[in-house]
Image (tube, rainbow, N blue to C red):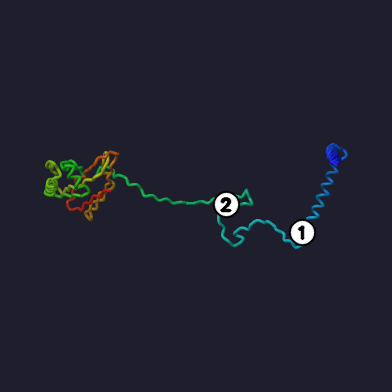
Amino acid sequence: MHKQISAKVQGSRHAVRGFKNNPSISVVTLTLCSFVISFFLLVSLGGCLRPDAPIIVITATPSPEALGQPAFATNTPSALNGNATVAPIVVTQIITATPAQTNTPFPYPWTDENAVMSGICFEAANDSAGTLFVLRSAEEHIRLYGLADESQLCRQPVIRSAFEFAGGRVLAGLWSRGTGCTARHDVLGIDRDDDIKQIIIRLRFVSEGDCNYELVRPFWIGLDGAADYDIDIEVS
């Protein structure tokens, strides 16, 4: 039995080799066989189809306008058409920014009177920081010096300097307190209304540097012809 199986296997191998090298099997024969097999499969499959089977036809999706719907732009390309042109979405953004405050250019309509008040010691000025003083006469000026002495914050009596109040001049000012290496006042705006007799001065107090120094910066000015004006100095 074993010999018979072996003989059949060897015979099959010879048959395969003979099939590859046999010139009697032509290309025409192979083509004819392929045609017959294809025809048989086509007839078999056709017999399996039901006469009433629905036919599915893939058609293009109608446009929104054809359906009576509004058209919308989209940024998603079509899955059925890789070459579809997508209308870009344009977003218009209106940006409004608050203009930065700029310093009022020099010269200013006043005189610098910081030297007049330099006789007030640091401790007294620091204690009065943020308080606006408007002095309209020499008597009010002398009274301010007296208050500084009476506070006993200064180790020595304050040095008193004269200011000329004649002609309706006014001495106005304040001290600002901060921490840093240097400090200054930037003038942001000046509003003078002669009809209602009002003067408003807007300042910005700036301290700069990483120094751990306590700073007191004076801002004292002399205003001409302002004896009967309402004077305000705003510091931000």
Quick check: 120 left or right of 26? Answer: left
Neighbour class for label 1 at 10 Å: few (<14), some, many (≥20)?
few
34 and 67: which is toward the camera:
34
Q: Residue at x 64, y 52 (%)?
A: 80
168 and 3: which is toward the camera:
3
| Label located before the other in sequence (1 or 2) | 1
- Report the number of discs: 2
Quick check: 86 left or right of 20? Answer: left
**Residue 19 visible in the snapshot:** no
234 and 123: which is toward the camera:
123
Name the mark on residue 76: 2
Identify which amino acid the numbered label 1 is placed on: Leu
The residue pinned by badge 1 equals 49
Tag 1 secondary structure: loop
Quick check: 74 left or right of 140? Answer: right
Identify which amino acid the numbered label 2 is placed on: Thr
Neighbour class for label 2 at 10 Å: few (<14), some, many (≥20)?
few
Q: Residue 173 appears at what percent x and percent y?
A: 20, 47
Q: Residue 223 appears at what percent x and percent y?
A: 19, 47
Mark in front: 1 vs 2:
1
Q: Residue at x 76, y 59 (%)?
A: 49
**Residue 122 visible in the snapshot:** yes
71 and 23: which is toward the camera:
23
Quick check: 108 left or right of 138? Answer: right
Disc 1 versus disc 2: distance between alpha carbons? 39 Å
Quarter residue 219 falls in: top left
Tag 2 secondary structure: loop
Q: Residue 89 appears at what percent x and percent y?
A: 53, 51
